[in-house]
Image (cartoon, rainbow, N blue to C red):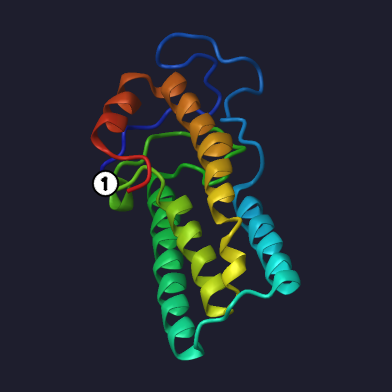
Amino acid sequence: MDYQGPVSPTATKSNRGQPLSPGADTPGVIAPPPLIYLGGLGVGFALNAVAGGAPLPSTVARPIGAALIVAGAGLAATFVRAFARARTPVDPYSPSKTIVTDGPYRLTRNPGYLGMTLTYAGIAIASNAPLALVPLPVVVAVIDRGVIAREERYLEQKFGARYTDYKRRVRRWI
């Protein structure tokens, strides 16, 4: 397993020696990422219901949507397994214990968010609700700025050069 060693969940200093303020041993994301995706999908379905997008033939929409759902859910599952193997929490409101760099993390720093993005697109397409895709770029921007950027700042502060070296080697998305 290729992860960067445990860090005490009760640490009071980052690896750079900077103090972590009380209760600040989390990234401070703006909302639980699955809820951000579900909120966008809900807005998209409402938009599709009101405006009625031009549907694709179901013989096209269902297989493409299903393939995206399977790919997204599979990628998300590998992310959860990688965190479990490293014994670090998936919950962004819990302190990270280590940097995970194996499994899907060799290819992308955010396989969970990439998986949720693919799943969102798959659900919209399989449901033949093309306008449900309209909010997806906004959702991805919110995830990128309100979740990922905060997680990266937190990991840099907590793990220092170990994380910045990893960031240089692996892309944020794909």
* Residue 29 horizontal/vertical position (percent): 61, 35
Residue at image x 66%, y 17%? 22
Q: Residue at x 49, y 58 (%)?
A: 117
Q: Could you tell me the amino acid type at mark 1? A: Arg
Q: Which residue is mark 1?
A: 106
62 is higher (above) or lower (below) than 163: below
Residue 159 image position (x, y, % from top left): 39, 23
Q: Secondary structure at mark 1?
A: helix
Q: Is residue 170 left or right of residue 81?
A: left
Q: Position of residue 91 (x, y in %)?
A: 57, 44
Quarter of the figure with residue 23: top right
150 and 86: which is toward the camera:
150
Binning the other alpha carbons within 10 Å of mark 1 as few (below 14), some (14 to 19) or many (20 upward) gives some
114 on left or right of 103: right
Q: Position of residue 158 (x, y in %)?
A: 45, 22
Residue sticking out furthest to the bottom: 59
- Please say if 80 is above or below 65: above
At 57% from the left and 81% from the top, the residue drawn is 55
